[in-house]
Each structure stands twice: as structure tokens, then as C-alpha cells.
């Protein structure tokens, strides 16, 4: 069976009352989704699986030391559907652990947060990537831009560089065609997938000068934030 669901209020209550080193947030989305938005909680590290497709997940979940070392796992995805499947896999791998998933995913969490009067306790940072013509949900966390340009590392989270996604002018790796973040200043200096490269405008890849994902195992990333960014543990979100 899928793991226990937590409402937005329960999610906050659980995560804001954890002892350091006991719990882990598990982002089961793809790398291009977590690049523009993710949950970040004091004393609870977030494991970005950085996968390009779902089939990359099983081996990563079975072998990652950060998952093995934590007593409690809190997983989330866009709308909750992927967590239903992933949570069953994680429970089969680690039957001794407490496994939780966010009910309704990021979309439901942000929808409830919209009517809340204290944005400082919105634990989601950045934007929620969606698989529709919008590319990202207009609702976002209190820190709206957490992505950065692949080339110069300036804050940036627009895969389409101001264009509508329907125009199909997004930046993609020349090998694996995965979405990549390239700021407006750097975009004109490189040729992304579908564009002609020249000596003055070289090809761009998801690893800058090479592809990091085609035929390679994902490279998970552990993200932490200091305890000083915490909001009151007694804060409750409306359901």
C-alpha cells in the first residue's frame, strides 16, 4: 500500500518539529522540475534525486546513503500521483522506516498557502513546474527564484526566456534534449538543441560543455538550509 498521506498542516507540523539528522525530504520529481522549486526546511535536508526519467529512481532509492541513514522519509511530487508509486517502492526497500507523502502534492500545498496570511511559513521555495502550456504554476513560494543560469550562475528560472512555452523556444541540451536554465544574457552566446552552432556560438549541453544525463546515472544532490530560517513550529495552515 502507499505510505501515509499528510495534509499541508500535518506536513508543516511534522517537518518543523524534527531533530536534526532524523528526517529527510525526498523530491521524487525530475531534475528540471526541482531546479526551479523545492521544499526547504531547517534541520531537514532535501534530497534532489536529479533524475531525467522515472526508470532512474529504483536503483537510486535502493543505494543512496542519505535515504538509508534517516529514520523518517517525507516525499513529495507535483500532484501526488508519482508519490503513490514511489512510496510503495521505498516501503518495500526500507520496511523499518516511517514513510510519509504530501497529500495532493505541491499544487494542493500552494493552493492552500495562497489564502494564508504568513508567507514566511510556506516551506516551498521557488516555482512549481507543471506539464501544461504554463510551464510553471503562477503560485510560488516566498522566495520566487531559486534556479540559476547554467553558464553564469545568476538567479534565473525561466526555461523559455520570456517566450510562451507554446513558441517552443526553450533552452534544451544538445544531446539529451533536457530543459536547461540559461539566463537572457547568456542565451544568445550559445546554441541549444535545434539551433545551429558556430565558432562564436558553441553548442550548449546540460553539463555546460558535455551531456551529464544521456546514458549516465543521476547525480543526486543534498540541499540544506540553516536553522535560523525557521518559522514558529506552532503555525498552522488552513485546510
Image (spheres, grey):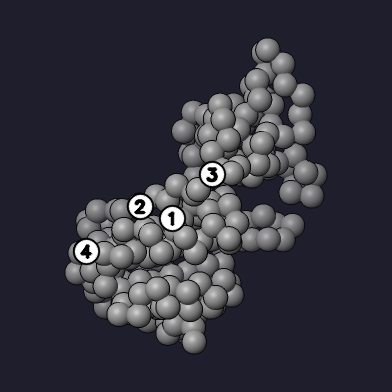
Q: Residue furthest top?
A: 199
Q: Nearer the viewer, residue 210 or 193?
A: 210
Q: Residues within 10 Å of mark 1 (few under 14, many from 20)?
A: many
88 to the left or right of 196: left
Q: CA distance from mark 2 to mark 3?
A: 19 Å
Observer able to see residue 115: no
Q: Which residue is mark 1?
A: 48
Q: Nearer the viewer, mark 2 or mark 3?
A: 3
Q: What residue is drawn where x is 43% and y is 55%? A: 48
Q: CA distance from mark 1 to mark 2?
A: 6 Å
Figure quadrant of residue 30: bottom right
Q: What residue is drawn where x is 60% and y is 33%? A: 205
Q: CA distance from mark 1 to mark 4?
A: 17 Å
Q: What residue is drawn where x is 66% and y is 36%? A: 175
122 to the left or right of 234: right
Figure quadrant of residue 211: top right
Q: Residue furthest bottom?
A: 1
Mark 4 or mark 2: name the one nearer the start of the chain.
Answer: 4
Q: Which mark is residue 222?
A: 2
Amino acid at each position: 500500500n502507499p505510505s501515509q498521506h499528510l495534509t499541508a498542516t500535518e506536513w508543516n507540523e511534522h517537518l518543523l518539529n524534527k531533530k536534526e539528522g532524523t528526517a529527510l525530504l525526498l523530491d521524487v520529481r525530475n531534475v528540471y522540475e526541482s531546479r526551479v522549486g523545492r521544499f526547504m526546511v531547517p534541520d531537514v535536508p532535501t534530497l534532489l534525486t536529479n533524475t531525467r526519467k522515472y526508470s532512474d529512481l529504483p536503483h537510486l532509492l535502493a543505494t543512496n546513503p542519505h535515504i538509508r541513514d534517516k529514520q523518517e522519509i517525507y516525499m513529495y511530487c507535483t500532484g501526488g500521483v508519482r508519490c503513490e508509486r514511489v512510496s510503495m517502492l521505498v516501503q518495500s526497500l526500507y520496511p523499518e522506516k516511517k514513510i510519509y507523502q504530501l497529500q495532493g502534492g505541491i499544487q494542493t500545498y500552494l493552493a492552500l498557502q495562497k489564502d494564508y496570511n504568513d508567507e514566511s511559513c510556506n516551506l516551498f521555495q521557488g516555482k512549481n513546474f507543471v506539464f501544461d502550456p504554463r510551464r510553471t504554476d503562477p503560485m510560488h513560494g516566498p522566495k520566487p527564484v531559486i534556479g540559476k543560469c547554467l553558464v553564469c550562475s545568476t538567479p534565473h528560472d525561466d526555461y523559455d526566456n520570456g517566450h510562451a512555452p507554446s513558441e517552443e523556444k526553450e533552452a534544451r541540451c544538445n544531446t539529451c534534449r533536457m530543459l536547461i536554465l540559461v539566463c537572457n544574457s547568456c542565451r544568445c552566446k550559445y546554441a541549444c538543441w535545434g539551433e545551429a552552432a558556430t565558432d562564436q556560438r558553441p553548442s550548449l549541453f546540460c553539463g555546460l560543455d558535455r551531456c551529464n544525463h544521456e546514458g549516465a546515472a543521476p547525480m543526486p544532490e543534498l540541499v540544506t538550509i540553516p536553522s535560523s530560517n525557521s518559522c514558529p513550529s506552532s503555525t498552522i495552515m488552513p485546510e
